[in-house]
Image (tube, helix red, strand yellow):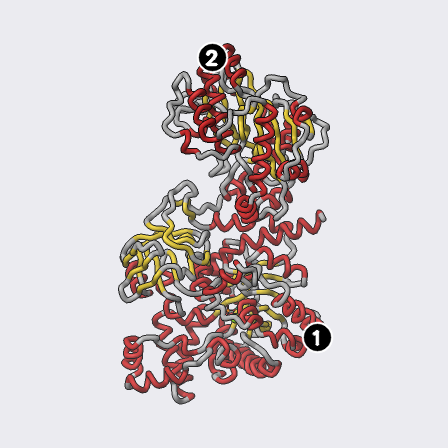
């Protein structure tokens, strides 16, 4: 046990954060009551039944001092047992205090202690004390009788016995299984220790101005400077926060304040708080007591903060010269940034959770339930927000997905279609919500508790938490304020890996630019073909019998694609743009139901039977491993020829009004060198033709997506034909595990819960397996082609853990959904800083 003085050996990793903070306050010569700290080791021994020498523990305190015990874990966020106040109150002390400070105040102190001792130490049922009149003159006697009845023993009168009981119960509570699981969920290690501090009480009750309260210098929601907190006369602990009767601190139009009532104490507290901010290098919340007009500081804890406040607080501390910029960057959790980029459910709002699923795209949105993409479009046309609910989405739903405020699917995982598109659009999305019954024909969702939500009813999707909520809870708007921009600029000064965005449309590209991406790392061109006018031409192309017919359809697609690419190049203003050639199986473009097939038959002027037969013929048992990507490029080469031409013509057009553009063209799903040779020959030929036709020269870079295990293994054969490799970790994970990215959601949570996988590998890169292929591919590729640019463009590109791995193996850039770009920029900066400072 250690009596806390300015020089006593107290450390956060042995005595916990609270003990260390109290020592800092002592060093600042603030009015802190006497405190003794018990280390993690001592508390662990107490839990095992080995009590410290109680006389020695109590020696620093006056013989009649009342004390309290508070928890002191290493990280305050890991929680701990609640504080127990007024230890030392007994019949004799009650009598003497009644004389000194009045019977009412003495009753308050003793009653509080009897009650918390009974519940927390003797483990009596809290109901025992229901229906008691706490204003009654004999309340203590009533409580003592109730205790004696239930516990079948007299209430302990010795302070040492009381304290021993409190210490034992707090130590054991910490080591219980449920408390351990709870803190592990908050990131605590399994063997995290608990320290305890025993502190002399300054009674907030008695004659003169007595009371307690909390104070902080910033608003916890906005992070803006504002003195916030409450003070309550004749109170203890945090009671001031629990009643409407408490005073404001600063003068306030809503009611009386401490500033007006006890101005000297208010000024003194303000000065202490300002000193703590500077010397503790953090925004702190102070717990204080006033006794006969004198201020005492009992405790200081880091101010609770929203993500928005976290950014503002870190930036202000750095701008005020209290912490360096690098530390400000380290203090903000990268994932918290995504809360700033999206609307969120107000943390104060009531949540009526209907069901949960996989949190696939962050942010929250409210809307009326619709069950088809067409209804989503209709709803948007009426100006009504809607939530698009599907078993799973497919490319045909894309327009409706654009128009929906949020997406909800029964199936799918973190890289399924709805998830990828949701993140790309910045639309909140929950997938794999299989605990809900999706009754699509009846147009209803049935919650696990039996409630039915029908088409047109309002629900809210919280894609940050993975929750589906009934109704419309209050929201906090997204805000990209100055502090955010400042923090991002500081991050860019530090980071040593580029961050590009996956962007398919001009709107995505604009978002990418707004978030300062270093270019586009993946443009999935197939997403450009789902506009209604293009889809019909696409279908004509797919159904063309003769090469001539196909060519005529493709000629119609060419100007559309050229226009798409010109726009992307112009928006990106000379930043690199990497365009992936057509990837998905063709049948994804065909209608999936009878009505759609009939419409198509009409448009093509073909009998329904022919259209149906041809659509069936294009179907595959396993389309993700079938005729897609480069395999399509080789068997139907006209598509890639058209895309290459569109890219080159757009290059010339966009270069006219700016710096020359060097487009990057990427071939998907490669597994053999010969595939690259064949495609490269044709693309070179298209480039030569365009150069001749237009009389203009240009450069381009050709690369492949390494997303099959074989491409990684044979990287040495493939690299000599390439300027770059981009690891498509979505497909690479799918193929390395032999695990369908669209179906894994069904059992992933069971797998993670049972520890088969530490995490969903589609979410966090599997460094051991998939990562090994990345390492091999990178080494072998660079061995054959030292200038090879390497990147990762799967969804992992935006996750901080994956970025750490990518930096280690020499990846030049990561590319992720535009809305994850800021998260990736900050994560990359933190990694660079941690490397620099060791
Ligand atoms: C990938 O497979 O990692 C990838 C980026 O491509 P897609 O998600 O479009 O298959
Ligand atoms: Mg892929």
Element under disc 1: helix
Q: Seen from this angle, which residue lies furthest top?
A: 99
Relative to 51, does residue 665 appear above or below in the rendering?
below
Check disc 2 and report the residue beneath it: 102
Q: Is residue 270 visible?
A: no
Q: Position of residue 833 (x, y in %)?
A: 66, 49
Instruction: Give the x, y percent position of residue 713.
Output: 65, 75
Neighbourhood count class around disc 2 (C-alpha, 10 Å): few under 14, some 14–19, many 20 upward: some
Q: Is residue 573 left or right of residue 471?
A: right
Residue 373 image offset from top left, x and y in percent: 33, 65
Indicate the quadrant containing the N terminus: top left, top right, bottom left or bottom right: top right
Marks 2,1: beta carbons within 8 A? no
Residue 150 is left or right of residue 45, and the answer is: left
Spatial CA distance of label 2 from label 1 is 88 Å
Q: Indicate left or right for 97 with 461 as reference.
A: right
Please count the marks in the image: 2
SS class, disc 2: loop
Given residues 146 and 657, the one toward you in this image is 146
Asked whether 602 or 802 is in front, the reply is 802
Q: Which label was assigned to residue 321? A: none
Residue 401 placement: quadrant: bottom left
Q: Nearer the N terminus, badge 2 or badge 1?
A: 2
Q: Which residue has dot 1 on it?
A: 784
Q: Return the residue nearer the eye: 510 or 384.
A: 384
């Amino acid at each position: 046990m250690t009596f806390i003085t300015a020089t006593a050996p107290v450390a956060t990793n042995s005595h916990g954060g609270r003990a260390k903070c109290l020592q800092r306050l002592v060093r600042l010569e603030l009015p802190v009551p006497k405190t003794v700290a018990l280390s993690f080791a001592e508390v662990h021994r107490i839990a095992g039944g080995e009590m410290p020498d109680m006389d020695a523990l109590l020696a620093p305190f006056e013989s009649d001092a009342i004390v309290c015990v508070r928890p002191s874990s290493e990280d305050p966020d890991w929680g701990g047992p609640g504080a127990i106040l007024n230890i030392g109150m007994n019949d004799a002390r009650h009598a003497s205090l009644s004389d000194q400070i009045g019977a009412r105040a003495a009753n308050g102190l003793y009653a509080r202690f009897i009650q918390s001792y009974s519940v927390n130490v003797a483990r009596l049922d809290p109901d025992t004390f229901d229906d008691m009149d706490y204003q009654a003159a004999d309340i203590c006697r009533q409580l003592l009788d109730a205790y004696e009845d239930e516990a079948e023993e007299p209430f302990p009168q010795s302070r040492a016995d009381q304290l021993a009981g409190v210490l034992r119960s707090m130590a054991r509570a910490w080591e219980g299984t449920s408390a351990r699981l709870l803190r592990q969920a908050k990131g605590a290690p399994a063997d995290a220790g608990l320290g305890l501090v025993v502190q002399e009480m300054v009674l907030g009750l008695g004659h003169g101005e007595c009371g307690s309260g909390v104070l902080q210098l910033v608003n916890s929601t906005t992070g803006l400077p504002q003195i916030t907190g409450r003070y309550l006369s004749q109170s203890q602990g945090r009671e001031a926060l629990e009643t409407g009767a408490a005073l404001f601190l600063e003068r306030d139009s809503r009611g009386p304040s401490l500033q007006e009532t006890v101005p000297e104490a208010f000024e003194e507290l303000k000065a202490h708080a300002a000193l703590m901010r500077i010397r503790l290098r953090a925004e702190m919340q102070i717990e204080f007591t006033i006794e006969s007009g004198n201020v005492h500081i009992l405790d200081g804890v880091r101010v609770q903060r929203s993500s928005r406040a976290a950014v503002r607080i870190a930036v202000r501390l750095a701008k005020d010269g209290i912490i360096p910029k690098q530390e400000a960057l380290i203090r903000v959790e990268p994932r918290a940034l995504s809360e700033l980029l999206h609307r969120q459910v107000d943390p104060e709002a009531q949540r009526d959770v209907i069901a949960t699923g996989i949190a696939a795209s962050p942010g929250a949105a409210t809307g009326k339930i619709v069950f088809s993409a067409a209804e989503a479009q209709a709803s948007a046309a009426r100006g009504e927000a809607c939530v698009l609910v599907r078993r799973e989405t497919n490319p045909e739903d894309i327009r409706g997905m654009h128009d929906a405020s949020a997406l909800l699917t029964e199936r799918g995982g973190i890289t399924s279609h709805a998830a990828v598109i949701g993140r790309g659009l910045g639309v909140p999305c929950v997938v794999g919500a299989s605990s809900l019954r999706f009754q699509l024909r009846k147009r209803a969702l049935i919650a696990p508790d039996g409630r039915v939500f029908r088409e047109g009813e309002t629900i809210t999707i919280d894609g940050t938490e993975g929750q589906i909520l009934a109704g419309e809870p209050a929201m906090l708007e997204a805000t990209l304020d100055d502090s955010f921009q400042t923090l991002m600029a500081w991050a860019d000064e530090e980071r040593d890996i580029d961050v590009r965005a996956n962007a398919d449309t001009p709107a995505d590209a604009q978002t990418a630019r707004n978030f300062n991406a270093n270019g586009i790392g993946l443009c999935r061109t197939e997403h450009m073909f789902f506009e209604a006018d293009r889809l019909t031409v696409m279908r004509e192309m797919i159904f063309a019998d003769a090469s001539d017919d196909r060519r005529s359809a493709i000629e119609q697609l060419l100007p559309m694609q050229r226009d798409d690419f010109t726009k992307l190049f112009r928006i990106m203003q000379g930043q690199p743009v990497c365009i992936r050639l057509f990837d998905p199986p063709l049948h994804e473009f065909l209608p999936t139901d009878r009505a759609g097939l009939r419409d198509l038959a009409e448009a093509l002027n073909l009998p329904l039977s022919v259209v149906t037969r041809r659509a069936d013929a294009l179907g595959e048992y396993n389309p993700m491993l079938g005729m897609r990507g480069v395999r399509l490029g080789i068997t139907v080469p006209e598509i890639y020829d058209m895309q290459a031409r569109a890219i080159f013509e757009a290059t010339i057009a966009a270069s006219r009004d700016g710096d020359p553009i060097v487009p990057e063209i990427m071939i998907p799903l490669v597994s053999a060198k010969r595939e690259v040779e064949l495609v490269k020959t044709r693309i070179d030929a298209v480039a030569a033709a365009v150069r001749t036709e237009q009389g203009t020269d240009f450069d381009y870079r050709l690369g492949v997506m390494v997303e099959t295990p074989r491409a990684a293994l044979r990287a040495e054969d493939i690299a000599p034909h390439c300027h770059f490799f981009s690891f498509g970790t979505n497909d690479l994970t799918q193929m390395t595990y032999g695990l369908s990215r669209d179906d894994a959601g069904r059992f992933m949570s069971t797998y993670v819960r049972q520890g088969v996988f530490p995490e969903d590998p589609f979410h966090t890169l599997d460094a051991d397996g998939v990562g090994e292929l990345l390492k091999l591919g990178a080494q072998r590729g660079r061995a054959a082609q030292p200038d090879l640019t390497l990147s990762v463009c799967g969804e992992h590109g935006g996750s901080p853990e994956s970025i750490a791995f990518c930096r280690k193996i020499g990846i030049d850039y990561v590319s992720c959904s535009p809305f994850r770009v800021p998260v990736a920029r900050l994560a990359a900066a933190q990694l660079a800083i941690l490397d620099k400072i060791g």
